[in-house]
Image (cartoon, helix red, strand yellow):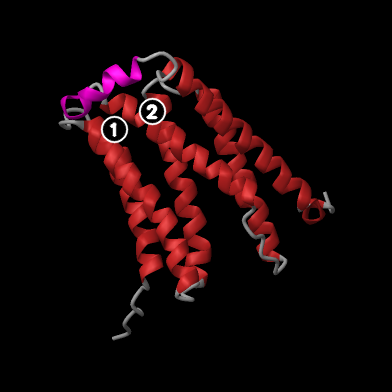
């Protein structure tokens, strides 16, 4: 009987991120889960941390694999898209912003697939990393706002009610910065790799 090779640690973390994403969505989708906002905050934060860890470990230990090259960016996008979709469902983020963010992610993923078919590997850019960082910060911020309505993190409510720290000020700033970085990084990515689309 053929046995599958054991998955290395970075790839295990990538798969764990996908599993945690499904848990995150389930927690916010199923009615009646105690402290759902707090649990969702914890799950998403852990999942986002694995995004930082798997890449660092893979590079430090020379554990870069084809599986990781495919699944790591995919797991990142699934996590972030899930975060924005669920926040939109909670009423924190307008649906049109979520659509723009999803469109950018699909566009860049499609471009990478075209490049891969040509034998070209498109490396991540610093602007894209900043985009991801602000997206994570924005999602975690609104999950904190959600969790602050529950007993375990109710002590955060006065902080969030302080001038400038609430969702109507700081929250909007985070959304717009994340959106602008998302769109600019996507357009920059397409422009720098426009030769891949030269036959259109």
> Which quarter of the figure is the N terminus placed in?
bottom left
Q: Residue 28 — which label? A: 1
In front here: 150 or 83?
A: 150
Residue 126 pos. (x, y %): 63, 50
Residue 99 pos. (x, y %): 55, 31
Q: Residue at x 38, y 35 (%)?
A: 140
Task: Check the image and report above or below for 173 versus 196.
Answer: above
- Asked if residue 157 lies left or right of residue 96, the reply is left
Q: Main secondary structure of the magenta part?
A: helix
Q: Residue at x 72, y 44 (%)?
A: 188
Residue 147 pos. (x, y %): 27, 28
For residue 166, say whether it is visible: yes
- Asked if residue 88 lies left or right of residue 27, the reply is right
In front here: 166 or 181?
A: 166
Q: Are marks 2 and 1 in contact (CB under 8 Å)?
A: no
Q: Residue 142 — which label? A: 2
In front here: 153 or 94?
A: 153
Query: What range is drawn magenta here?
Result: 150-161
Q: Residue 64 — which label? A: none
- Picture quadrant of residue 148: top left
| Secondary structure found at label 2 | helix
How many numbered markers are drawn? 2
């Amino acid at each position: 009987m053929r046995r599958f090779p054991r998955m290395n640690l970075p790839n295990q973390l990538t798969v764990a991120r996908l599993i945690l994403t499904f848990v995150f969505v389930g927690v916010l989708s199923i009615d009646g889960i105690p402290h759902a906002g707090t649990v969702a905050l914890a799950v998403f934060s852990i999942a986002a941390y694995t995004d930082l860890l798997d890449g660092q470990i893979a590079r430090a230990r020379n554990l870069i694999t084809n599986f990781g090259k495919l699944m790591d960016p995919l797991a990142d996008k699934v996590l972030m898209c899930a975060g924005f979709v669920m926040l939109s469902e909670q009423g924190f983020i307008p649906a049109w912003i979520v659509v723009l963010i999803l469109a950018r992610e699909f566009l860049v993923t499609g471009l990478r697939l075209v490049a891969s078919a040509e034998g070209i590997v498109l490396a991540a850019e610093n602007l894209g990393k900043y985009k991801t960082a602000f997206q994570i910060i924005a999602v975690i911020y609104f999950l904190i706002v959600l969790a602050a309505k529950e007993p375990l993190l109710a002590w955060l409510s006065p902080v969030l009610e302080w001038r400038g720290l609430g969702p109507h000020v700081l929250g909007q700033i985070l959304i717009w910065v994340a959106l602008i970085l998302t769109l600019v990084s996507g357009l920059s990515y397409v422009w720098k790799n426009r030769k891949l689309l030269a036959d259109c």
